[in-house]
Amino acid sequence: MIQKRRRFLWAKAHLKWTVAKWKTVLWSDESKFEVLFGKLGRHVIRTKEDKDNPSCYQRSVQKPASLMVWDCMSVRGMGSLHIWKGTINAERYIQVLEQHMLPSRCRLFQGRPCIFQHDNARPHTASITTSWLRRRRIRVLKWPACSPDLSPIEKIWCIIKRKMRQRRPKTVEQLEACIIITIPKLEQLVSSVPRCLQTVIKRRGDATQW
């Protein structure tokens, strides 16, 4: 209930932002992509007698191979994609910002003012990260917790993962080849933010379908 209340208040506070204002935001996020196994969507009917038959079982992988992906976007295009294995901490996140976010911001906004958005993951809110952002004089959009539905870049992850399920990569190399970000209609995604905020307000901070 506390988070819903904060989402509601955040949406009300930012509802006055115009689409032009949202177009000055550099959206960023990480997402996990896993190698796919099994036959998704298929179901088997078996008899009681076959419940212990090995042929009725399907192999599963408890911890499938995976990759972490970071990227950023604005209405002007996608940023510099970064792929790595394993988790991320604050030190590594700062490296991503230095090596990928800063060049992307320069290329996409070409010196024009912009606002950087990231969520409240621990590496993002760590003191060394916030200090680094302050030293770089990067304006950061205050973000409500538990709100992936408010960010346009989350829709991009959904599009990529839907396409990835169709190709069904079985190795890390095949998985990396699937993660190619060529997303059209970025302007539509960013322009939808005000409508998303209206939905959040209507639902009193509850999750939306955006």
Image (cartoon, rainbow, N blue to C red):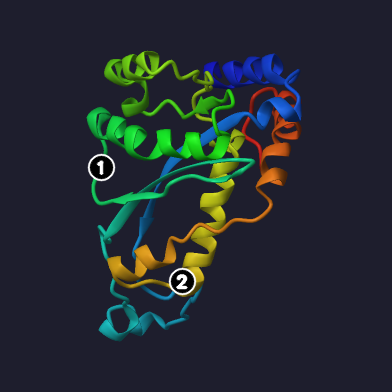
Q: Quadrant of the N terminus?
A: top right
In the image, taking residue 17 as reference, residue 126 lies left or right, namely left
Q: What's the residue at 65%, 47% (across, down)?
A: 186
Name which of mark 2 and mark 1 comes first in the sequence: 2
Looking at the rendered structure, the kind of residue marked 2 is: Leu
What residue is shown with label 1? 87
Q: Secondary structure at mark 2?
A: loop
Query: In the rendered image, which quarter is residue 60 located in?
Result: bottom left
Let me know if residue 203 appears in the view. no
Q: Quadrant of the C terminus?
A: top right
Let me know if residue 149 appears in the view. yes
Residue 33 drawn above or below residue 11? below
Front one among 36 and 184:
184
Q: Nearer the viewer, mark 2 or mark 1?
A: 1
Query: In the rendered image, which quarter is residue 63 located in?
Result: bottom left
Q: What's the residue at 72%, 21% (across, down)?
A: 17
Q: What's the residue at 67%, 39% (across, down)?
A: 190
In the image, taking residue 51 as reference, residue 140 lies left or right, namely right
In the image, taking residue 32 as reference, residue 27 lies left or right, namely right
Instruction: Return the x and y of residue 163 as percentages of the image width and height.
Output: 53, 66
Q: What's the residue at 32%, 19% (across, down)?
A: 132
In the rendered structure, find residue 40 and report the number of the disc placed on it.
2
